[in-house]
Image (cartoon, grey):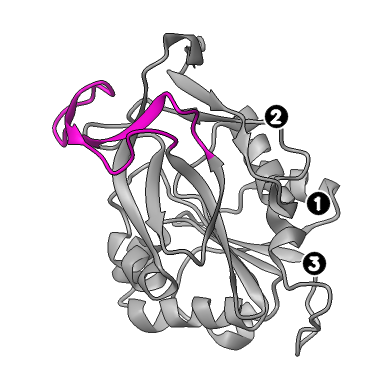
């Protein structure tokens, strides 16, 4: 599927740009590889083919159970979707301890890339444990676009919006713009959501000024129906990064539709 293929490209863009700075030498030599964590049991072969074509060797883990510092040190980048928190809860994992392992991994020089799955509320306790100590908070606020000229619908999905408001950074090199979903997957589950961060973070991608964030109606499946204004009345953050020790953390709390 096109979305799966392009997710592989997105991850590839971040792979080397999220690792430690060239001047820093990791204590343990690392393979050029990425860890994809998910709740399913099967590896995403289409994503893996895309990554391997770009010289990236991917690995796969479907649970937080058994995660150790030694295991994480194998990888240049760890990609953590929101739902992994639910997998940890189901396995009886100590989420506070495990979140600390991920932060320590980044502090030592690793790259941590954080996504959300299609359900905004899933794994929220893991989000809080992982992000609060690094000065970030996920906001379950949907994004709405007020300019009809910046909306479009495909034959099978939509609506989508588009932004070309990007900061120059190694992680955005070669990216001209970003399309993001506005529609809800299910009642109360917005498409793209946003976040707030402390000054240690740098926002790399924002919506155009005509977009804003709103509180979604938890019972409605209409992306236009809201219960109140959100945190941002304009230029909503979509992607942010921060240096953390010798490594970096990137916060992208929704699955991008595609990049160009």
Front residue of this view, candidates 40 and 96: 96
Q: Is residue 94 visible?
A: no
Q: Picture quarter containing residue 193?
A: top left
Mark 2 crowdedness (10 Å alpha carbons): few <14, some 14-19, many ≥20: few
Q: CA distance from mark 3 to mark 1?
A: 10 Å
The residue shown at (51%, 12%) is 154
Q: State the quadrant of the N terminus.
A: top right
The residue shown at (73%, 73%) is 20
Within the magenta stretch, is there residue 219?
yes
Prevailing secondary structure of the magenta residues: loop
Q: Is residue 55 visible?
A: yes
Secondary structure of the residue carrying tag 2 is loop
The residue beneath circle 3 is 32
The residue shown at (66%, 50%) is 11
Q: Residue 197: image x %, image y %?
A: 41, 59
Start and end of the magenta stretch? 206-235
The residue beneath circle 2 is 260
Secondary structure of the residue carrying tag 1 is helix
Q: Residue 15: image x %, image y %?
A: 72, 58
The relative height of residue 170 versus residue 222 in the rendered view (above or below) is below
In the picture, the disc for residue 36 is none
Q: CA distance from mark 3 to mark 2?
A: 24 Å
The residue beneath circle 1 is 52
Mark 1 crowdedness (10 Å alpha carbons): few <14, some 14-19, many ≥20: some
């Amino acid at each position: 599927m096109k979305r799966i293929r392009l997710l592989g490209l997105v991850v590839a863009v971040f792979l080397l740009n999220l690792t430690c700075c060239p001047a820093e030498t990791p204590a343990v030599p690392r393979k050029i590889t990425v860890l994809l964590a998910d709740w399913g049991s099967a590896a995403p072969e289409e994503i893996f083919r895309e990554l391997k074509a770009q010289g990236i060797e991917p690995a796969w883990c479907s649970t937080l159970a058994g995660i150790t510092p030694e295991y994480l040190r194998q990888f240049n980048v760890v990609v953590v979707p929101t739902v992994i928190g639910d997998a940890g809860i189901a396995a009886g994992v100590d989420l506070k301890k495990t979140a600390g392992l991920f932060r320590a991994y980044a502090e030592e020089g690793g790259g941590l890339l954080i996504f959300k799955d299609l359900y905004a509320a899933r794994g929220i306790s893991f989000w809080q444990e992982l992000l609060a100590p690094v000065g970030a908070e996920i906001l379950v606020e949907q994004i709405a676009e007020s300019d009809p000229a910046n909306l479009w619908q495909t034959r099978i999905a939509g609506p989508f919006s588009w932004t070309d408001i990007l900061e120059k950074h190694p992680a955005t090199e070669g990216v001209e713009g970003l399309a993001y979903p506005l529609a809800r997957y299910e009642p109360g589950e917005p498409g793209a959501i946003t976040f707030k961060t402390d000054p240690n973070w740098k926002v790399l991608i924002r919506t155009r000024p005509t977009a804003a964030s709103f509180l979604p109606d938890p019972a409605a499946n209409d992306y236009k129906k809201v219960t109140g204004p959100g945190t941002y009345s304009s230029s909503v953050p979509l992607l942010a990064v921060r240096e953390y020790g010798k490594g970096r953390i990137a916060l992208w709390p929704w699955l991008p539709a595609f990049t160009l």
